[in-house]
Structures are given as structure tokens and as C-alpha cells.
Amino acid sequence: MNKCKRCLLNELAGKEDIYAHVQKTRELLSDNERASDSLYNKRLDVCRECDSLLEATCLKCGCYVEIRALKIDAKCPVKRW
Ligand code: SF4
């Protein structure tokens, strides 16, 4: 099976359940906790260009980046965002 180097969960076949979990988690965060849409998307754009992204997972911390980027005070483990 080919690995999708630059994919996020919302694009990976067979990961729909996990992506639904991301969306649910995002909805459960309060406005004070949740990164804005623009901040969230900006973070994910950085991840897409990062060599440490593999199949939606950050190889530096082991997190799905779409989950890691959810909270406003979240940080990239190597300070890229
Ligand atoms: S969280 Fe940071 S290190 Fe991990 S994939 Fe995103 S930019 Fe790269």
C-alpha cells in the first residue's frame, strides 16, 4: 500500500471514523479553548509542508496533526507553529 506523505485524515481512505472523532472533539472544545478556523488551517498548512508528516501523523510527537492543532494553546513539538 502506498503511503500518502502529505495527506491529512480528512483525505485518507479508511480513516473516516478518526476524522469524525477530530470533528467531534473540535465541537466539544469551548470557544476559549478552540483554535480559530484560520489559525487551525494555518497550522495544518505548515504540517503539510513538513517532512515529519506521514499519513496525517506527526513523526516528532506521534499525534494526528488535526487533533494536535485543535487547541488554541497547542504547539508544534519543533516550534514550526
Ligand atoms: S506538528 Fe510540527 S513537526 Fe509535526 S508535522 Fe506539524 S509542523 Fe511538522
Image (spheres, rainbow, N blue to C red):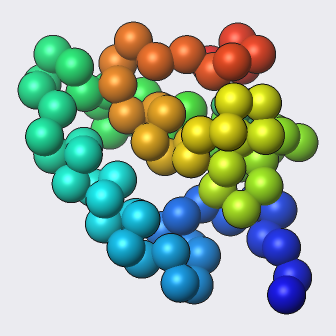
Q: Would you say 9 lies left or right of 53 here?
A: left
Question: What residue sits 83% from the left and 73% below the top?
Answer: 3
Specify the quadrant of the image occupied by residue 33: top left
Q: Would you say 44 lies left or right of 79 here?
A: left
Specify the quadrant of the image occupied by residue 51: top right
Question: What residue sits 77% from the left and 47% below the top?
Answer: 53
- Residue 47 is situated, as x and y percent measured from the top left of the image, at 69, 40
- Answer above or below: position of 39 versus 9: above
Quarter holding ligand 1: top right
- Answer above or below: position of 47 versus 57: above
From the image, which quarter does the N terminus lie in?
Answer: bottom right
Q: Would you say 38 lies left or right of 36 here?
A: right
In the image, 32 versus 17, the foreground residue is 17
Q: Residue furthest front?
A: 62
- Residue 5 is situated, as x and y percent measured from the top left of the image, at 82, 62
Question: What residue sits 35% from the left and 25% below the top?
Answer: 71
From the image, which quarter does the C terminus lie in?
Answer: top right
- Residue 54 is situated, as x and y percent measured from the top left of the image, at 78, 55
Q: Would you say 75 lies left or right of 3 here?
A: left
- Residue 55 is situated, as x and y percent measured from the top left of the image, at 71, 62
- Answer above or below: position of 49 versus 1: above
